[in-house]
Image (cartoon, grey):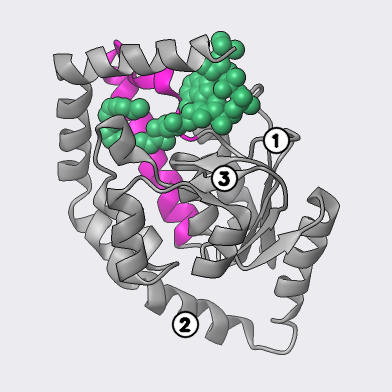
Amino acid sequence: MTLQRPPVNSLNLDLLKEMSKSLDEIAKNKSKAMILTSASPKVFSAGLDIMEMYKPDLKRVEEFWTTLQEVWFKLFGSNFITAAAINGHAPAGGCLLAMSCEYRVMTGGNFSIGLNETALGIVAPNWFMDTMTNTIPVREAEYALTTARMFNVEEALKVGLIDEVATDKDDAIAKCKGFIGKFDRIPALARSITKLKMRQAAIKRLQDGRREDLNEFLQFVQNPKIQKSLEMYIQSLKKKA
Ligand SMILES: CC/C=C\C/C=C\C/C=C\CCC/C=C/C(=O)SCCNC(=O)CCNC(=O)[C@H](O)C(C)(C)COP(=O)(O)OP(=O)(O)OC[C@H]1O[C@@H](n2cnc3c(N)ncnc32)[C@H](O)[C@@H]1OP(=O)(O)O
């Protein structure tokens, strides 16, 4: 599955709906595995589209968040094998997508990956945190989340946020295929049940608290102070150019 929403693959409602549909198709056609990557040469995904949260239409922003939750359920909780070929920056929601897969290969270069929410004055939802503690040790996750740590490729490898480094996108995809090949001799049902048991606690936490999570998000985006900081953040991103 190749993300292709220039310039930075930010996750807006339309892209999330497309992803949700594609994940259903992959599950339905009984694919063995999926590799998630990006068509951009330097950004895997810039995370959530900030414009979806800025001065939002309430009905749309509610659909936006519930679709994001759905994409996470379908990706993190998939029966099929998932790997991410991370060929560029992966901040926040981009990091969430990569961590929701079972294996991550990142191309070398001046790219970074991490959950940077606290730097933006926001708190990553519980399920973002759960996805991170499912990937790296709890102590490292706490440190990374509180300090909004963006890891470079070597740091990400060292902490286990990624599993391998690749020279370029083709190499990243080849290495993801190498990971998928490891399951050729493992019975598929035993593999998928084991994966889902490992992920069950995080999945159940969001299933049980899904409405509450949505309400928290809706309150958050309607807070005038948050809107003000979003405005400033958007300006700072635009000033960069
Ligand atoms: C910030 C959210 C605050 C409050 C939200 C309210 C409630 C939230 C409650 C809970 C939600 C928490 C979970 C949030 C998760 C997220 O994912 S938030 C998004 C966080 N993402 C980022 O901070 C990444 C920002 N982008 C970058 O750092 C860089 O763009 C990049 C490193 C990814 C790529 O760098 P470059 O290649 O140099 O590209 P540019 O920076 O020049 O960007 C090109 C173009 O794209 C626009 N853009 C970049 N990121 C986003 C984005 N996430 N959403 C929308 N638009 C984005 C950027 O402004 C440029 O636009 P133009 O100048 O070309 O108009």
Label 3 to label 2: alpha-carbon separation? 30 Å
Residue 169 can be seen in this image: yes
Instruction: Mark 1 and ligand 1: say if the CB distance to the nearest ligand atom is below 8 Å.
Output: yes
Residue 12 can be seen in this image: no
Q: Residue at x 51, y 33 (%)?
A: 17
**Residue 13's mark?**
none
Query: Mark 1 — residue?
Result: 42
The span shown in magenta is 47-76
Most common SS among magenta residues: helix
Label total for image: 3
Q: Relative to residue 30, is residue 71 depicted above or below?
A: above
Q: Are marks 1 and 2 in contact (CB under 8 Å)?
A: no
Residue 185, percent from left and from top: 73, 89
Q: Relative to residue 12, is residue 85 depicted above or below?
A: below
**Residue 112's mark?**
3
Q: Amino acid at mark 2?
A: Thr
**Which of the 4 quarters of the picture holds residue 148?**
top left
Q: Relative to residue 115, is residue 30 depicted above or below?
A: below
Q: Relative to residue 220, is residue 151 depicted above or below?
A: below
Residue 151, percent from left and from top: 51, 51
Tag 2's secondary structure? Answer: helix
Q: Circle 2: is it few (<14), some (14-19), or many (20+) Cα within 10 Å?
A: few
Tag 1's secondary structure? Answer: loop
Q: Circle 1: is it few (<14), some (14-19), or many (20+) Cα within 10 Å?
A: some
Query: Mark 2 — residue?
Result: 194
Q: Are marks 1 and 3 in contact (CB under 8 Å)?
A: no
Mark closest to the chain's N terminus, 3 or 2: 3
Q: Amino acid at mark 3?
A: Ser
| Residue 188 magenta | no
Residue 241, percent from left and from top: 60, 12
